[in-house]
Image (cartoon, rainbow, N blue to C red):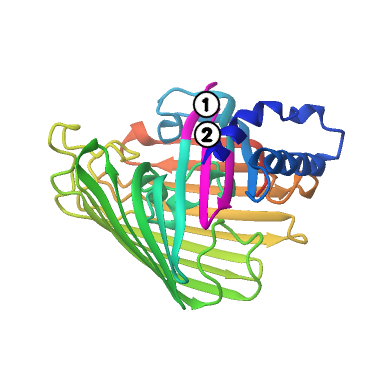
Amino acid sequence: MLTPILALGALSSLPPAASAPGGDWLDLDAEIATLAADVAGPGVPAEIGGRLLVGYFISRDPYLMTGSTEHASGVDLRSARLHLRGSDGGWAWRVSGELADGSMELVDAWLEREIHTTTHFTLGRFKRPVLQAGMVDSEYRLFWDRGNNGAQTVDRELGLKLGGDYGQFHAIVSAMNDVDGLRDEAFLSARVEYDLLGEPFDRYEGAYGAAEGIHLGLAGAAAENGALDNGLYTAYELELTAGGFFLGADLMFFDPSYDMTGGFSNDVDLNSILGTSMADTHPLTVTTALLFGGSRYELAGRVEVFDDEDETSRTSVSFSLYDEVLGPRSRILIDYADVTSDDPTFKGDKVEIGYVFVVAD
């Protein structure tokens, strides 16, 4: 297992993007793949890749976007991530680090083993496997900001999970360290997917690159935050792709007594975007997208109802211009988000334009 360590250490030998010949960005992908093979050695397939998400935003009273009630604008380096992934001796593995803050921070570090033709086992640090909206990686989202429900389930922790694929059914159960770290409590979850039509849930959001034909999938999940006095919630989602059309929806149900207690934060859930109690709330997110222009353009819209006592909601629209010169899924992304609420603190809007660069999709 020295392979991930050696490969991450070799990342410094990659040429800077600006030094690549004009228009020959695909050569950079080839150089990265060659480097990964050289580092891994014979018989150990490995791949080095990453992403760069950078944009310029302008917002007015953007509490939900920046955590501030002041007008704000500027360049936002959302992510500069490198990853190494591969397989060796029946194991699959991934290690990734985030550099956006100027230093390397561990993001993913997991090992996966197939223990049966339909079942696999994962151990390490990974995302909570609850909602697809939380599991989809940032570079594959339709919007700069993750939806409310996805943001509730996006946390990464150390843990283990067992997944299985049984025809049209897919299931994942997990036990992970909770917000209390290595204490005696755990975050427990179970997720079941059912493919009504076509392929399973995609790792991407939107219609770009979706399988041909019609896909319709349903999923349900339940999770328990063991570190809370009552941390139970359930979640449900739907995903539809047909040609160049995409529709996604997710709905969460928080227990009437779901609150952060036991000295963590004055009965306020630390994961709440609004910073208010989520007890007995049912937040809903609906997303739709249309792919056109020979699969080069994608227009998307999203409506989120937070179901809080202030009737807060967020409406977003986005436009993606895919750039095949820089590789599949690299694109210019423009989006606008507007928040309405009875609480003036939460009101605000934001427009952001930037670039999503993906290496080794």
Tell me which secondary structure the magenta stretch mostly adopts: strand
Please name the amino acid that badge 1 sits on. Answer: Met
Q: CA distance from mark 2 to mark 1?
A: 6 Å
Which of the labelled discs sits on residue 104, or is there none? 1
Q: Residue at x 49, y 62 (%)?
A: 248
| Mark 1 secondary-structure assignment | loop
Q: What span is colored magenta in the figure?
A: 83-106
**Do tag 2 and tag 1 residues touch (Cβ < 8 Å)?**
yes
Vertical comparison of 115 with 111: above or below:
below
Would you identify the image quadrant in which residue 80 lies? top right
Q: Picture coordinates of residue 82 (x, y %)?
A: 59, 36
Specify which label sits upstream in the sequence, 2 or 1.
Answer: 2
Q: Is residue 104 magenta?
A: yes
Q: Circle 2: is it few (<14), some (14-19), or many (20+) Cα within 10 Å?
A: some
What residue is pinned by disc 2? Answer: 97
Q: Is residue 150 magenta?
A: no
- Viewer-side residue, 91 vs 242: 91
Q: Is residue 330 left or right of residue 180?
A: right
Vertical comparison of 205 with 33: above or below:
below
- Report if residue 177 is visible in the image: yes
Q: Circle 1: is it few (<14), some (14-19), or many (20+) Cα within 10 Å?
A: some
Q: Picture coordinates of residue 324 (x, y %)?
A: 78, 50
Please name the amino acid that badge 2 sits on. Answer: Gly
- Viewer-side residue, 77 vs 123: 123
